[in-house]
Image: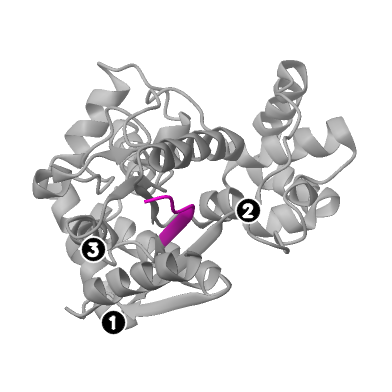
C-alpha cells in the first residue's frame, strides 16, 4: 500500500469513537492516533476514557506521552501527530486521527503558525494582575486585544488567557490570527473526514452514565493521589480537564469547610456543555461523512469509504 491518506474520525465525547476506530482497525491496516487533549497525560486515568481492556488490542499513539505536571500546546501536539502520520505511511498503514479535541484536529489538518516562546517575566506580571483582581479581569482585557481568542477561552481559564495575552503583547498580533482566519484554505493532507453523531437525548444519557463510571472507577481518590503523592498543583494544566477540575474544587470546598456541591451532577452538566461545543465545532468541518454512532452499519460504511478513497487515489 502506498496511500498518503489520512482518516479523521471525530465526534462529541461519549460517541463511541474509540470502539468504532478499533473495529475499523480490525479490518484494515490502520495506525490509530488519539486526538484528545487529556489522554496525552500520564497518571490520569479515571476520567480520560483512554483505551482500555479490549480497546488496547491495537496500539494507540499519543496516549500517555506527557507528564501530568507538564504542559502541552497546539504546536507540540501537531508536531507529534505529524510524526505519527509519517510513521504510519512508512509502515504502509493508514493513519486514523481519533478524538474530540477539535482545535488539535483543525491545527493538524490546516497547519499552525508558531507562536513566540513563553516570557516568564511577562507571565509573572499578568499573574500578579490576576491575583490582584481575578481571571475575569484579564479575560476582559483579552476581549479588547483579541476578541476572537476571548470568544473561545472560558473567562476562568487563566492559563489560556495568559498565553493569549502574552502572544498579543509580545508580537502585536492576536493569537487567533496565527491560526489563520478560521483555518480557511486547503487541507495539508488528503483527508477522509468521518463524523459521528447520535440523538442529543441519547448522547446525554451516555455522558451521564460515563460520569457515574468515572466516579465509581475512583476519580476522587485519583485526584487526591495526584495532589498529594504525585505533588501536582491544582493549577496544573492536566487538572483543568473536565472531571478533574470539578473534583479539585469539590475537595477544596471540603477542606475549607464550605458547603459541597453535587459532584456527579456538576461534572455531568459541564460535560454536556462541552459536548455541545464539540458538536458546534465539528459541524463546521468541511466534506464530512456523518454517520450514526450507534448504527451497526457504521463500521462497514467507514471501511467502504476508506477503500473507495484508496481506489480513487490509484
* Mark 3 residue crowding within 10 angstroms, few (<14) / some (14–19) / many (20+): many
Viewed as shown, does residue 115 lie left or right of 214? right
Q: Is residue 190 visible?
A: yes
* Element assignment for label 3: helix
Q: Work out how far the residue at label 3 is from the one at label 2, CA to CA, in angstroms.
A: 25 Å
Q: Which residue is mark 2?
A: 188
Element on which disc 1 rests: helix
Q: Residue furthest front?
A: 314
Q: Earlier in the sequence, mark 2 or mark 1?
A: 2
Q: Any mark on residue 201, and which?
A: 1
Q: Is residue 85 above or below residue 204?
A: above
Q: CA distance from mark 2 to mark 1?
A: 36 Å
Name the foreground residue: 68 vs 221. Answer: 68
Residue located at (76% from left, 29% from top): 116
Name the spot of residue 19 as percent of width and height, x first: 20, 59
> Circle 3 is placed at which residue position?
20
Q: Is residue 40 magenta?
A: no
How far apart in space, not on screen, are marks 3 and 1 (Cα)? Answer: 20 Å
Q: Taking 100 as reference, is 116 above or below it?
A: above
Residue 74 locus on image (x, y percent)? 58, 40
From the viewer's perspective, tell me whether residue 237 is left or right of residue 144. Answer: left
Please report the residue visible at 23 percent of the width from the left and 24 percent of the height from the top.
225
Q: Residue at x 76, y 16 (%)?
A: 121
Q: Is residue 5 magenta?
A: yes
Report the magenta residues as a range. Answer: 1-8
Does any portion of residue 276 appear in the rendered image? no
Binning the other alpha carbons within 10 Å of mark 2 as few (below 14), some (14 to 19) or many (20 upward) gives few
Q: Label 1 neighbourhood size at 10 Å, few (<14), some (14-19), many (20+)? A: few
Which sits earlier in the primary sequence, circle 3 or circle 1?
A: 3
Camera-side mark, 3 or 1? 3
Amino acid at each position: 500500500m502506498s496511500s498518503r491518506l489520512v482518516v479523521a474520525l471525530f465526534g462529541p465525547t461519549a460517541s463511541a469513537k474509540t470502539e468504532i476506530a478499533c473495529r475499523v482497525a480490525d479490518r484494515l491496516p490502520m495506525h490509530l492516533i488519539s486526538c484528545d487533549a487529556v489522554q496525552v497525560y500520564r497518571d490520569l486515568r479515571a476520567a480520560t476514557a483512554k483505551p482500555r481492556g479490549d480497546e488496547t488490542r491495537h496500539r494507540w499513539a499519543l496516549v500517555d506521552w506527557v507528564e501530568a505536571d507538564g504542559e502541552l500546546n497546539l504546536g507540540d501536539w501537531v508536531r507529534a501527530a505529524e510524526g505519527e502520520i509519517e510513521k504510519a505511511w512508512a509502515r504502509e498503514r493508514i493513519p486514523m486521527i481519533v478524538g474530540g479535541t477539535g482545535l488539535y484536529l483543525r491545527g493538524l489538518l490546516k497547519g499552525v503558525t508558531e507562536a513566540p516562546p513563553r516570557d516568564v517575566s511577562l507571565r509573572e506580571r499578568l499573574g500578579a494582575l490576576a491575583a490582584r483582581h481575578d481571571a475575569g479581569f484579564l479575560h476582559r482585557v483579552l476581549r479588547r486585544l483579541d476578541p476572537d481568542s476571548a470568544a473561545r477561552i472560558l473567562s476562568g481559564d487563566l492559563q489560556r488567557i495568559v498565553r493569549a495575552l502574552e502572544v498579543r503583547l509580545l508580537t502585536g498580533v492576536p493569537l487567533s490570527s496565527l491560526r489563520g482566519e478560521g483555518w480557511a484554505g486547503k487541507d495539508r493532507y488528503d483527508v477522509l473526514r468521518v463524523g459521528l453523531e447520535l440523538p442529543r437525548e441519547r448522547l446525554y444519557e451516555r455522558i451521564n452514565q460515563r460520569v457515574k463510571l468515572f466516579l465509581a472507577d475512583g476519580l476522587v481518590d485519583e485526584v487526591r493521589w495526584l495532589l498529594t503523592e504525585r505533588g501536582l498543583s491544582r493549577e496544573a494544566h492536566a487538572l483543568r480537564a473536565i472531571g478533574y477540575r470539578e473534583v479539585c474544587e469539590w475537595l477544596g470546598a471540603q477542606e475549607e469547610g464550605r458547603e459541597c456541591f453535587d459532584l456527579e451532577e456538576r461534572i455531568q452538566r459541564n460535560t454536556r456543555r462541552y459536548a455541545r461545543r464539540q458538536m458546534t465545532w465539528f459541524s463546521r468541518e468541511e466534506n464530512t461523512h456523518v454517520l450514526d454512532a450507534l448504527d451497526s452499519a457504521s463500521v462497514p460504511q467507514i471501511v467502504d469509504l476508506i477503500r473507495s478513497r484508496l481506489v480513487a487515489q490509484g
